[in-house]
Structure formats: C-alpha cells, structure tokens
Image: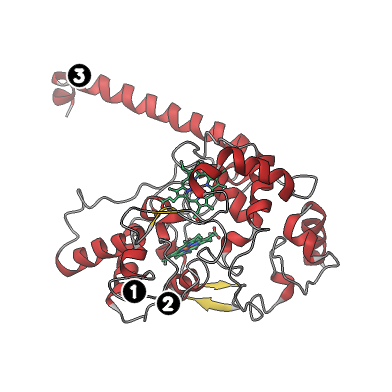
Amino acid sequence: MWKTIKSNWPVAIISIVVVIVSLSEILNSNRSSGTKFTSSLSATNDTGWVSPSLYTDFELEGEERNLVIYGSDIIANTSRYLGPHGSVKAISNGMNCQNCHLDAGKKRWGNNYSAVYSTYPKMRSRSGQIEGIYKRVSDCFERSLNGTAPDSNSREYQAIYAYMKWLGKDVKKGVKPNGSGIGKLEYLDRAAEPGKGKIVYAKYCQTCHGENGQGQLSLAGNSYEYPPLWGEHSYNDGAGLYRLSNFAGFIRSNMPFKQATHDNPALSTEDAWDVAAYVNSQPRPKKDHSQDWPEISKKPFDHPFGPYADSYSELQHKYGPYKPIIKQKEEMGKK
Ligand code: HEC
Ligand code: HEC
C-alpha cells in the first residue's frame, strides 16, 4: 500500500488538492445561498442531488430503459404526445411538464423530481388523503395542464413512473434533497402589488411570454417556445403556481429563463412577489376546488380561497401581508 502511494505521489498530491478545493467550494456555495433563501439555511451540510445519467447508467437495461427514456421525453415534450394535437391522446392544454419542472425535472431549484420516489406515498392536506405518485402526477395534469390524467395502466403513465423512480433511485427513503421543489422567499411586510408587478413584467418577462401572457407557439405549432402565463391555455386556479409563494419562489430562482439562477437571481425579492401578484391577478381557467383542503386549518397561508380557520380575508391570503397570518396560524397550532 505505502509502496504504491510513494511511487504514485504526484497523483496522491493532486487528489488531496482536488478534495480540499471541492470542499471549500461546497462550503462557500452553501454560505452564499443561505443568506438569500431561508430554506437553504436548514440544509447547509447537504450538497444536494445530482441526477443519474443515461450515458453512465449501464444497469438500466431493456424494457425498463425504454420506459425511462420515453418518460423523460413525455416530461419534456408532453404536448407532442398528450396536448391538443397530441399523437397519443388529446388530454392537456399544450404546456409541457418541463415548463415548470425544468430540464425534465432534473434542475436544482427548478422544481425537480429528486424527492418524488423517496417521499411518496405521503399524506397531503390539499386532498386530505395519502397520495401515491399516480395521484400526484394526475394532479398536475388536471391543474397545471388544465386537463385530464392518463390512465394509470397506460404506457404513458408507466413511463412517467419509471422515469421518476429512476431519478430518485439514489435518494434514501424519506429524504428530500436540498434543491428539490421550489425555493422559499422571505416575506414582505406589505401586500404584494399587481400594479408594481406589471412594470416588472414589462421589463423582465414580456419579450418571451408576450404582452398578454399568451406565450409563443413553436414554429411546428404543436408546443410552446415560451409557455403562456395566463389566459385560456395556462394553468388553472387550482394549480400550485396559483399560490403566490410557489410562483415567486419558482421565478426568483429560474426567470428570466437561462439568466437567473438560485444563487444568482435576476429579480429582487420584492419584484418577484409583485410580478407573481400581477400574473396571478390575470384571468385563467377555473377548477372546482371546493373539495380541496378538507381540513381548513391546514390551508396554506397563501391559499386564496376561503373559508379559513383564521379571521383574515381572501384578499390578504392571496396577496399578503402574510406574516400576521402565519403568526396566528402558529399560535392556533400551539393551543
Ligand atoms: C404550471 C406549472 C406546472 C406544470 C406545467 C407541471 N407542474 Fe408539477 N408541480 C408544479 C408545482 C408548483 C408543484 C409543487 C411544488 C412544491 O410544492 O414544492 C408541482 C409538483 C409536482 C410533483 C410533486 C413533486 C414533489 O416533490 O412532491 C409531481 C410528481 C409533479 N408535479 C408532476 C408533474 C407532471 C408529471 C407534469 C406534467 C404532466 C407536471 N407536474 C406539470 C407545477 C407544475
Ligand atoms: C428569455 C425568455 C424568457 C424570459 C425573459 C422569461 N421567461 Fe419564463 N419561461 C421561459 C421558457 C422557455 C419557459 C419554459 C422552460 C422550459 O420548458 O424548459 C418559461 C417558463 C416560465 C414559467 C412556468 C411555465 C408557465 O408558463 O407557467 C413561469 C411561471 C415563468 N416562465 C415566468 C416568468 C416570469 C415571471 C418572467 C419575468 C420575470 C419570465 N418568465 C421571463 C422563457 C422566458
């Protein structure tokens, strides 16, 4: 052993240097992101998750490999298969899952799928039920894609399931890796203002998403180059992005597209809340969500539909200020 190390000492020294440099990078990156996003403060020693790669995963073979590849393609190009002119079935609004789960659900802080296989089935208060992966996927079809879900025994759903299972294969049961889902933003002391958000929208968003939030179809016409943010082809009012905290957190880490990152956001916290308020004050499809949050005390602070267990209005739940609502929620929880 010592003999080999001695004869390979240049290699040994290089390896030690590499380890030290990467350790200090990891520590630094956590420190800088921790000051901007409250959620990363609690997970500073978790360096996050790296998606598996089809190029290096030789264990994934045969039919399972085909399913994973098809699943990844459905997430990236949902509309091609399941949109209004879909080759398999027309059951969704023309958006792709990837529009909100960036890089086919593999991007850090891009609403990725790293925690799906490890944390489902789980209890979810929106439905008041224990939900498996099929129910959760169906939810996004019915709300974010304002459509209907594919059958659980269809090849399309089997492929989506295989893909999510594969993405999460190295994540331990119950673990939610740092960088999964959507980053949390600090709350403002005031309500978010659609009027201010309109100005932010014109400056940072309009070139791609359009003056009326309608997005822009690709040349082939069967999917969006830039997805719609409101109007009849957008997500409905039962979708996760209709809650301001999800919208603001998602865009702060990811928009403008390919310019902002989680560690280097383009928008200030205020601009992110205000533009979220502007976009979510515009018209969009409606969903019957009267059965959602059956236990009203479990409604999140920014769920914009009453009745509530507290005394705050729908308007304040929608736009804030949220701090008093959260405080009252905590106090009621203690009783
Ligand atoms: C308009 C945006 C949008 C689109 C399009 C969208 N989703 Fe989602 N999705 C969300 C949001 C928001 C969440 C909740 C994230 C959170 O709570 O942290 C979510 C959550 C999920 C989750 C649960 C993730 C977890 O870790 O708990 C799954 C699974 C999922 N989506 C699947 C899909 C699938 C499959 C599609 C395409 C059929 C899709 N989504 C399309 C916005 C979207
Ligand atoms: C350079 C073009 C560009 C700009 C500028 C831009 N976006 Fe996007 N946006 C995109 C693209 C492209 C996607 C879809 C990403 C994908 O499918 O991989 C997207 C997706 C989204 C989504 C999720 C999908 C949906 O349609 O609901 C939201 C929300 C969003 N953008 C909001 C914004 C906001 C708010 C701004 C301004 C702060 C903004 N974007 C600026 C290109 C852009």
Residue found at the very far top of the displayed protein? 10
Mark 2 and mark 1: span between their CA atoms?
9 Å
Percent from the top left, x then y, of residue 335? 83, 68
Q: Amino acid at mark 1?
A: Tyr
**Mark 3 vs 2: CB contact within 8 A:** no
Percent from the top left, x then y, of residue 271? 66, 41
Say which mark, if any, is on residue 157: 1
Above or below: residue 151 compared with residue 53:
below
Above or below: residue 125 compared with residue 246:
below
Quadrant in which residue 282 is drawn:
bottom right
* SS assignment at label 3: helix
Q: Amino acid at mark 3?
A: Trp
Residue 150 can be seen, yes or no: yes
* SS assignment at label 2: loop
- Give the mark toward the camera: 3 or 2: 2
Q: Residues within 10 Å of mark 1 (few under 14, many from 20)?
A: many
Q: Mark 3 vs mark 2: which is more N-terminal? A: 3
Residue at (36% x, 53% y) in the render? 218
- Give the mark toward the camera: 2 or 1: 2
Q: Is mark 2 within 8 Å of ligand 1?
A: no
Q: Quadrant of the N terminus?
A: top left
Mark 3 and mark 1: span between their CA atoms?
53 Å
* Residue located beneath label 2 in the image: 149
Residue at (25% x, 64% y) in the render? 70
Q: Amino acid at mark 2?
A: Ala
Say which mark, if any, is on residue 9: 3
